[in-house]
Structures are given as C-alpha cells and as structure tokens.
C-alpha cells in the first residue's frame, strides 16, 4: 500500500471525529435523522478547518445504504455514515459517479455552469442523491454565478449542492440567500494539541507538550496545517522531536536568544538588543517569525499586566507562566501596548518592503525611546489638590504675630528645594490672594466678625464683577483652565449656570463644583445654587465641506503646531516646563 500523508490518513471518517466544528456537525446530523435536507449548502471559513471533509461526510451519510443502526433497545438513524456499504466506500475512494467534486478556480466560466445545469437533470447513477461539491466557489465569474442562480433556486429533488469557500464576502448575496450557510471556525490551541497527541501516540512519535504547543501556535488555528507541519518535522528530525530541532527546522529563534532579546527590550538596553538581533540574523533565523514570537510574548505579558489571573488566555508554555507574572508586575500596560503597536507596524513594513533586520533594528530604537506617560487630567487634578493645600496653609493664623521676612525664610529652610514649576505655583497662589490691611482700631472687630461668620450680602446684579473676584480666589488650574473662558448667567430664581469650554470640561467634576460653590458663597455672603454645563459649539456658517475635508486630512506636524498655538495647552506646557512629544 502506498504511503499516505498525515492529513489524508487522519481525515475524519465520522462526524464525531471532526474537531472544533460541533455547531456544524450537530445541525447536519439532525437534518439527516429527521430527513429534512436542504437543497444547497454554503460552507465558509478559514483553510484547513474541515469544510471539504464535512461535505464528503454529508454526501456519505445521505447516500449510506445502512442509515439505520441497531442499539440495545431500538433501531435508530444516527446520522453517521456506516463506512461499510458500497456507497460509503466509493465516496471515500472518490470513485462514485453520484458525488461530483469540482474546483471553481479551474472551472469558473459560464460554459462549465451550463454543462452542470444540463447534467443535474439526470437521475443519480446508483444512489439516492447526486451531490455536487464546488470548492473555492468564490472564484466563479459573475456570469457563472448568474447561470447558477435558477438551478439553486429550483433544483431537481435528487440534487444537493455543497459549496465551500474561504472568502465569504465575495459570494453574491443572491447566492447566499438560496443556501443554508455554515461558518467553520478557527480551532483553539488545545483542540489542535489534543489531535496531534492522538496522532503522535499512534505513529509512535515522541513529542512533549511544549513541542506540540509550538506546532499548534505556528498553525494559527488550522488543523491541516498542524498535521502537515508535524509530518514535515518527523521527516526532517525523526520521531524524537525536541524543542531545539523543531525551532531549527522551522527557522525560529532559539528560546535563549529570544529571552535575551526580550530582556534587553524590558531593561531598555538598546546595545544588547541590537547585538542579540544580529546573532539571530547570523544564525539564519527567519526574523519575520521571530517578530511574530515577540508579538505573542508581549501580548501575553500585557494580559497578565491587566490581570494576573488570565491564565487561560496565555499562549506561552505553562512552565513560563510564573516568570511572566513576575515580569508583568514591573512594566505598565501603557508601555506594553506601545511596544505591541510598534511591533505590529514593523510587521506590516516587513511584508510590504522587506529588509527585516533593518526594520527590526528601527523598532528596537523606537521601543527604547518610549517614556512612561501620565494622563494630563490626573496631573491637573493633583496640582489643584496641591494648590488647595497651599492656600489653606497660607490662610491659617500663626501663634506669633511677628512673622519673619519671607526673603530670608526661603534660604533658611534646609529641608527641601523648590523646583521651577512649584515656585511658579507658589508665586501664582501668593499673587492671586488679596489680603486686607486692617488698622489697629478695627483689627479686633474684623477678627470677631470672621469668627462669627458675619459677611456682607452682595447682589447678583453685579455678576461680572463678582465673577472676576470669584476667579481670583479659585486655584490657578481652575481659574486658568476650566473657568478661564467660562460664561456665567443667572436666572430669575437666583441660580447661576456656568457654561464651560468643551476642551476643559473634563475638569468639571464634583470637587470643582464644590470649590466654585464655596467660593461664590464666600464672595456673595449667602448660599447659592451652581450648575456647570458644557458650552455649545456653534458651527461657523462659512465652514464648507472643502474646509472640513482639509481638517480631517491634517498631518501629525500640523496637529502638533495647532496644539502648540492653543493658549490653554501653552499654559500647561509653561507650567510644567514640558513639550509635546506626539499628537493623536
């Protein structure tokens, strides 16, 4: 007997042997058992997931001469082929005249479909149904599809069409609407590993779980690819498969070198990373495959950085799981996301332009330049809290009425240094406060009035002047950020509504509302109801479709220039001595 490759030898002969497509096989078996068969089926999904195999099993099951099988208590139709009758044997061997397989890639014209339409009128040669299996049906021409429409809509009762394709979106909707369509899905790694282990045990192949896991990852969810890959490894390395010879055969980077490369990336050691990449290149490793391994590694690391309990989603070997969890605690999700983004972009560049080593070197340089980032709104809120503490500390009375000279206190305190940004905050907070100058005659009465909370009640008729006074008492980040261009209005019931700029409305939280309410109460001398709303942005009438299109097509350089010209952003940059790195 001639040699059979693994993919042919281990092709499922029963529906129960099909891996990962239970949602398809269960439905087809129910139709066979209830004898409610459709006249046209469309199987679509990735390559190597069982479309043609299931089509042949269906052809055997509907033409099986022994559909009824005896159990202990009764005779039932199982929906499985018996694989013992002449019909099952002929279909398995591909010699049945009633099961016609055709490749639409090489039989795609209207003449072929016209011949098919004439042949479907003929009765089956030997069995109950004549089955047409059309593989890669999306390759048919438009004329071919149109010629097939009428036959699909009203086929003879003895004909069943089964069409298979990997490109579901290229099938005309008029064809899909006349078929029962079934989607075949990618297999998960565990399903592929289980099938490979079964083959390895029967073929007396020695392969541990790490080897089978690597094969499953390389097959990318396609069982046929995994079976062919296993056979290739057995042919080249023998039946004793180790991780090392598998990596050498597939042109993958060794675990040791890849470990060195990831360590260099995580440790920001650019020189070590470039040296390791050069070693991989000199060993003749496929750098594109090494890049895929890096993407998978950092993907696992990011998942564990989000939640270290996501073990089921991790594709790396289980033996490396504890080490990955330790590393995930030392690197932020933001940095990992930016690393993956750079690597994915590099993958596209290699596919389009080549020069794998050059592209990977550029990627390492970009990754090394990544800085940890903090969200701007978090920084602003922290600064507001700091300013409030500074204001409260400056307003507290001191037990000694004779205060030292502020010029000498700045140099006499050795416990801390004030950087430039903090000094600007202090100067702003000091300048924004207007202290009264009480005389010796009324100082005691002023103190008593403060303690008893007796204040002068002011009218809302002078709202513009009151608003300026309120802003002068607010923390700098609120006064120059959220409320700098805000417009207050008052209704007949005395409620104040403040329309805030949309760009800074993210600062309008409960803390900001509490702050502005307390400040208004202090200035007015009475309680007041405050409401913060987002200012409505009215489109300019002169704005045309052409100008909006130009706005959409802005380049990163243009967006950066616009950001630098924005007054509010400029204030933030000046406050932190910062500069813009990139714009989204």
Image (cartoon, rainbow, N blue to C red):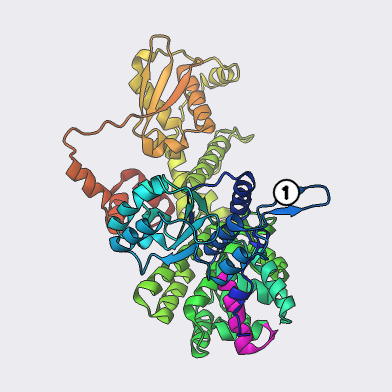
Residue projecting furthest to the top: 492
| 493 is higher (above) or lower (below) than 130 | above
| 449 is higher (above) or lower (below) than 233 | above
Q: In which quarter of the image is the N terminus?
A: bottom right
Residue projecting furthest to the left: 542
Is 234 a magenta residue?
A: yes
The answer to whether any part of residue 449 appears in the image is yes
Name which residue lies at 69% across and 70% down: 320
Q: Viewer-proximal residue, 345 or 18?
A: 18
Q: In this image, 398 relative to 69: left or right?
A: left
Q: What stretch is highlighted in magenta?
A: 223-242
Q: Viewer-proximal residue, 299 or 426?
A: 299
x, y (%) of residue 268? 54, 73
Kindly identify which residue carries mark 1: 76
Q: In this image, 464 relative to 198: left or right?
A: left
Can you tell which quarter of the image residue 189 is in? Answer: bottom right
x, y (%) of residue 92? 59, 69
Is 491 a magenta residue?
A: no
The answer to whether any part of residue 259 appears in the image is no
Q: Viewer-proximal residue, 360 or 452?
A: 360
x, y (%) of residue 43? 49, 56
Name which residue lies at 44% across and 39% down: 476
Q: Viewer-proximal residue, 506 or 187?
A: 187
Q: In this image, 77 relative to 340: left or right?
A: right
Marks counted in the figure total 1
Main SS, magenta region, reads helix
Can you tell which quarter of the image residue 261 is in? Answer: bottom right
Task: Give SS at disc 1.
Answer: strand
x, y (%) of residue 432? 42, 36
| 234 is higher (above) or lower (below) than 321 | below
Estimate how packed mark 1 is, as few (under 14), some (14 to 19) or many (20 or more) residues with alpha carbons within 10 Å: few
């Amino acid at each position: 007997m001639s040699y059979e490759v693994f993919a042919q030898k281990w092709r499922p002969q029963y529906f129960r042997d099909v891996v990962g497509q239970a949602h398809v096989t269960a439905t087809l078996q129910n139709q066979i058992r209830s004898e409610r068969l459709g006249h046209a089926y469309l199987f679509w999904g990735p390559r190597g997931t069982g479309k043609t195999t299931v089509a042949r099993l269906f052809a055997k099951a509907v033409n099986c001469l022994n559909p009824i099988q005896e159990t202990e208590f009764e005779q039932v139709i199982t929906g499985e082929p018996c694989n013992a009758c002449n019909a099952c044997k002929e279909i398995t061997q591909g010699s049945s005249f009633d099961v016609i397989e055709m490749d639409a890639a090489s039989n795609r014209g209207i003449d072929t479909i016209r011949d098919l339409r004439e042949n479907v009128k003929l009765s089956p040669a030997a069995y109950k149904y004549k089955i047409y299996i059309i593989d890669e049906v999306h390759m048919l021409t438009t004329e071919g599809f149109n010629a097939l429409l009428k036959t699909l809509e009203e086929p003879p009762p003895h004909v069943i069409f089964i069409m298979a394709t990997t490109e579901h979106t290229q099938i005309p909707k008029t064809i899909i609407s006349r078929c029962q369509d079934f989607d075949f899905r990618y297999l998960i790694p565990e399903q592929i590993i289980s099938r490979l282990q079964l083959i390895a045990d029967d073929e007396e192949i020695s392969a541990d779980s790490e080897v089978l896991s690597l094969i499953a990852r390389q097959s990318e969810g396609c069982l046929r690819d995994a079976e062919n890959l296993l056979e290739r490894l057995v042919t080249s390395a023998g039946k004793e498969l180790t991780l090392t010879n598998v990596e050498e055969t597939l042109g993958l980077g060794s675990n040791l070198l890849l470990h060195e490369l990831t360590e260099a990336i995580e440790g920001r050691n650019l020189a070590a990373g470039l040296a390791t990449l050069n070693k991989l290149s000199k060993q003749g490793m496929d750098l594109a495959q090494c890049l895929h391994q890096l993407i998978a590694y950092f993907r696992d690391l990011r998942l564990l950085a989000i939640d270290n309990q996501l073990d089921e989603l991790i594709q790396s070997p289980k033996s490396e799981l504890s080490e990955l969890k330790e590393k995930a605690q030392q690197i932020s999700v933001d940095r990992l996301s930016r690393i993956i983004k750079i690597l994915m972009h590099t993958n596209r560049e290699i596919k389009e332009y080549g020069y794998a080593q050059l592209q990977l070197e550029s990627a390492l340089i970009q990754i090394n330049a990544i800085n940890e980032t903090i969200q701007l709104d978090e920084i602003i809120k922290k600064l507001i809290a700091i300013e409030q503490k500074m204001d409260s500390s400056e307003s507290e009375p001191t037990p000694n009425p004779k205060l030292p000279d502020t010029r000498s206190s700045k140099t006499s305190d050795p416990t801390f240094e004030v950087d430039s940004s903090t000094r600007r905050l202090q100067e702003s907070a000091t300048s924004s406060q207007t202290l009264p100058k009480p005389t010796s005659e009324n100082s005691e009465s002023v103190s008593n009035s403060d303690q008893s909370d007796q204040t002068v009640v002011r009218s809302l008729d002078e709202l513009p002047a009151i608003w300026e006074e309120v802003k002068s008492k607010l923390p700098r980040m609120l006064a120059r950020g959220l409320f700098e261009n805000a417009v207050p209005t008052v209704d007949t019931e005395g409620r104040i509504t403040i329309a805030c700029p949309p760009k800074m409305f993210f600062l309008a939280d409960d803390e900001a509302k509490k702050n502005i309410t307390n400040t208004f109460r202090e200035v007015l001398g009475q309680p007041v109801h405050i409401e913060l709303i987002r200012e409505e942005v009215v489109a300019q009438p002169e704005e045309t479709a052409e100008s909006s299109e130009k706005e959409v097509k802005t380049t990163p350089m243009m967006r950066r220039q616009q950001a630098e010209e924005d007054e509010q952003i400029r204030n933030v940059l000046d406050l932190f001595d910062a500069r813009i790195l990139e714009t989204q």
